[in-house]
Amino acid sequence: MRHFVAVGIWVIVLAVLTYAGINASGLATQMNPVVASTQAVSIDSLWHGEMVVLSFLFALIVAPITYSLVVFRRRKGETGEGVHFEGNTSLEIGWTVAPLVLVVVFAYWGAYSLGETRRVDPNALVINVKAQQFTWTFEYPEYGIISKELHLPVNQQVVLKMQSADVIHSFWVPEFRVKQDVVPGRVTEYRITPSLVGDYKVRCSELCGTSHAYMESPVIVNEIADYDAWIAEQKVIAEEAGKTPEGQGQLLTVKNGCVGCHSIDGTPLTGPTWLNLYGAEVELTDGTTVLADDAYIAQSILEPNAAVVKDYPSPSLMPVFALTDEDIANITAYIKTLK
Amino acid sequence: MKRFSSSALAHGLLWQLIGTLFGAGLITGIRAIMGLELTAKFFFTEPAWVLGGFIGAISFLFGSGVTSDWVKWARGIDTPEHHEEHYSGWEKFVNVSLDHKVIGIQYTIVALALICIGGTFAMIFRTELAASQLQFLTTDLNLFGQNGPQIYNTLMSLHGMIMIVSILLGISGIINYVVPLLLGAQDMAFPRLNAFSFWIAVPAAVLLLSSLVLGGFDTGWTGYPPLSSRAPVGVQMFFMGVFVAGWSSILGSLNVIVTVLRMRAKGMNAMRMPIFVWAAIATSIIAMTATQFIGLAFQLVLFQRLLGMGFFDPAKGGNPVLFQHLFWFYSHPAVYVFILPGLGVISELLPVFVRKPLFGYRWIAMSSLGIALVGFVVWAHHMFTSGMNEYLRVPFMYSTLLVAIPTGVKFFSWVATIWQGKITTPTPMLFVLGGIIVFLLGGLSGPPNATVSTDLHLHDTYFIVGHFHDTIFGGFVFPFFAALYYWFPKATGRRMNETLGKIHFWLMTPSFLIMTFGMMYVGLLGMRRRIVDYDPALGLDTSHLVLTICGFGIAISVAIFLYNFFNSIKNGEKAEGNLWNSRSPEWQVPSPMPMHNYDQPFEVVGEPYDYGLEGSQYVKFSSAPAKSKHK
């Protein structure tokens, strides 16, 4: 009997210590990154409930084992065997039924919490998201804006309609807690209500190829006023750009995600940079060189494998883009300006 | 050297090479006639490599001689029922043997070799991850036609699959060696099929590793299309490697089931079987019925790439999510294939070292079957964020949480077994206890992934990586080491060095615990899986450095183990008797085990684990076991 009392106390002490340890590392009441969405609140509260119960279960198993290892160890010179008992049906039934109750409770809680994260606001702002190796592009259909940054108004539900151009990607902002895969051939939905103004990042969390690690884009939660200002500014930029061929070209390179792999400032990315490209001599994988003129740029867009630049993977990683001659002329005009 | 070059292994490998060249040449010839391209980046074209790889694997089997008895029968030539051993020493293990003990050791050695390869891969990319930014796997690196991040992806993917194959071979090793001994059988039910199951795993491992030099593959071990349908040709070698290794698993488990059903000693009814046999049965049922699905899933992608069939290509009406269902329908039950034998080892060894009966034998036996059955209906919990039907997530959450119940029965029963024992802690017992604690951590880190809403955060982060390393180390690696330390004297007549064994344990356990806690920690803070580089702004550099140091701690401890293992075969302290004072039948005869196992048959006359009950006996030999003739 005294063993049971002693081990009972030890279970409680260890459970408290375990929870305190998790809490000390900042992971008990929330999954650590700041809470930046209303959905995260219900997710974190389920997490906290699990940490409490799991700390207890951990102690429930580890405490009697450690206690036994100390108290029931074979001492020097001691002979003989352990106490002979083979089982106890009521105990077995007990520790089958008690966890069953826990399972039902947590499954209910889990389903409830899932429901909370999926709660629909009919006035949600719709934003189209396009994922492709290795960029995110955001389109605000109401305003005709295309952006490489996702700007969201605080305390307003948004629904992202996500599509992939190539392989599976996954949209995850750790501060929002929620994650949703983007699957080719269908539109998946990501519903979130940002609750904290700040700069975050969407991080692609489904392995999508060589530069998967770098498939990150800024997610900026603004006050309503700042958000409206940004929208207005972007609308002007889009309108201005639409007036010239190079402006339209620039919009096309954002919309199609070109600049995810081709930098405009000389930074090495997945593909060759466009800085000082036009008119330069380009060395190819087969050892020849070619002049980067209109024809070369058009060929590179329509047949990425025809002439792969030296030191870049062959066959090329670049998808084929179905662009019109006018689009290509505009993009070429834009590339010409990058000096 | 000459003795090696004339071995079945060397012949097999040579024939695999010849077969590969023949198959690839055949396709290249046909392409020449059709006027198609003859070479590609990695010399042969993709169809040539695929047929070459396939014919190479078959050639290995014929070349090694493992099929020669079947060929003879087909030609109407009789062969002796029992093969006499022609070889001694290490040569036994590189030639075809029908003895289940030799095959068990062959499996174990290959498993250890693969653990070393997979572990080396892990150390390479773990070093890369020690700090943010790219250290040595840089974009201007060019190795086997891959740049640094691509090499990272290949190594990370191969680490996963090589370790999985090594686990499958490791459990086959233990099951093959131990189960017939526990049953009192002379051998497995189908000795030739048993040899075949082992030998087919060798070309599979070669195929898998060949993907490294054929452009690698950047898909992870899961190989999700469309990424895998665009990956370099290496991914085809990976698919074929898994496909061929699957045969080993399916045929091996068939053999185990028949052996247990048909070859038990007199008096050994279901509830008097050693508990490890129950685990072997449960794991074999899963392996025999589920393995087909991963083979099928990968085969469909292989055909999609080769023949343009759009199974998973949305542009052709295919569905990428379908692949995930097929894949996980095997790959979730597969993790129970990995852990059930390990949990069986824990249940088998605990009574020996606490000198008490196994608490709730029937409940533990049934819980193995329970885990196996529930394991079949939980697969979609890997797909909570995949875009499958939203409402399906709830029933899969329930079924997943249900796994806690049979697993809980095991834990509580182990605790009750330890309670009021007379506990000693030699090396095998240390690994048993380590296995229980580590597996407990794996189990407890499971529910947050099972409840859908928390999983939306945790999915595809390092939290998952920490969780499954806990389950696999607790469910397989620790018990596997326990089993090796425990049955090593049975196989060799010598024991492994205790001091080195304890150093192995006390270096590996803390390193591992810190490593997996660290993985879960960085995962919660925003560290994604399968990335070569991480955002320095996340502030994870210090944690990752600690993770890498702990990773090397584990590597060093395994190196100590390997030295101890191979050194003790010749130089270990002699241990020919019942070293652990066990009631199990294999320990009632001298070590090493005689060639055809028991010279005298035994009868089961009592309960297997009645430690501490005066005068009770588990097995009775029909007369006193004669000293082994085959020394």
Image (spheres, coloured by chain):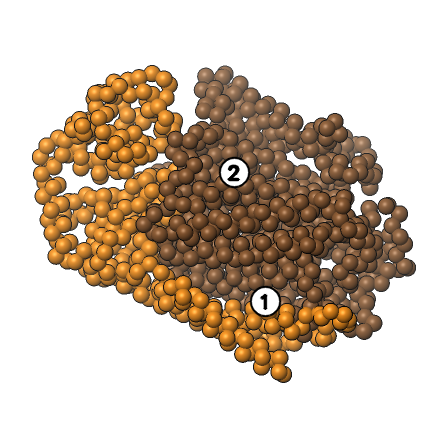
Chain colours: A orange, B brown
- Spatial CA distance of label 1 from label 2 is 37 Å
Q: Residues within 10 Å of mark 2 (few under 14, many from 20)?
A: many
Q: Secondary structure at mark 2?
A: helix
Amino acid, disc 2: Phe
For the C terminus of chain A, give its image quadrant.
top left
Q: Residue furthest bottom?
A: A1
Q: Residue A308, relative to residue B275: is it above or below?
A: above
Residue drawn 62% across and 83% down? A2
Q: Is residue A107 visible?
A: no
Q: Residue B575, how many percent across, how many down?
A: 79, 53
Same chain, labels 1 and 2: yes
Q: Secondary structure at mark 1?
A: helix
Which residue position is annotated with label 2? B239
Marks 1 and 2 in Cβ contact (< 8 Å): no
Which marked residue is nearer to the observer: mark 1 or mark 2?
1
Question: Based on the displayed image, in which of its 4 quarters is residue A29 positioned?
Answer: bottom left
Residue drawn 49% across and 49% down? B549
Residue drawn 56% across and 22% down? B26
Q: Residue B257, how many percent across, how many down?
A: 69, 53
Host chain of mark 1: B
Q: Residue B339, relative to residue A326: is it above or below?
A: below
> In the picture provided, is A124 more to the left or to the right than B28?
left
Q: Residue A98, how many percent across, how many down?
A: 52, 74
For the N terminus of chain A, give its image quadrant.
bottom right
Mark positioned earlier in the residue sequence (1 or 2): 2
Which residue position is annotated with label 1? B411
> In the picture provided, is B487 more to the left or to the right than A240?
right
How many numbered circles does the render carry? 2
> In the picture provided, is B593 more to the left or to the right than B52?
right
Camera-nearest residue between B224 and A253: A253
Host chain of mark 2: B
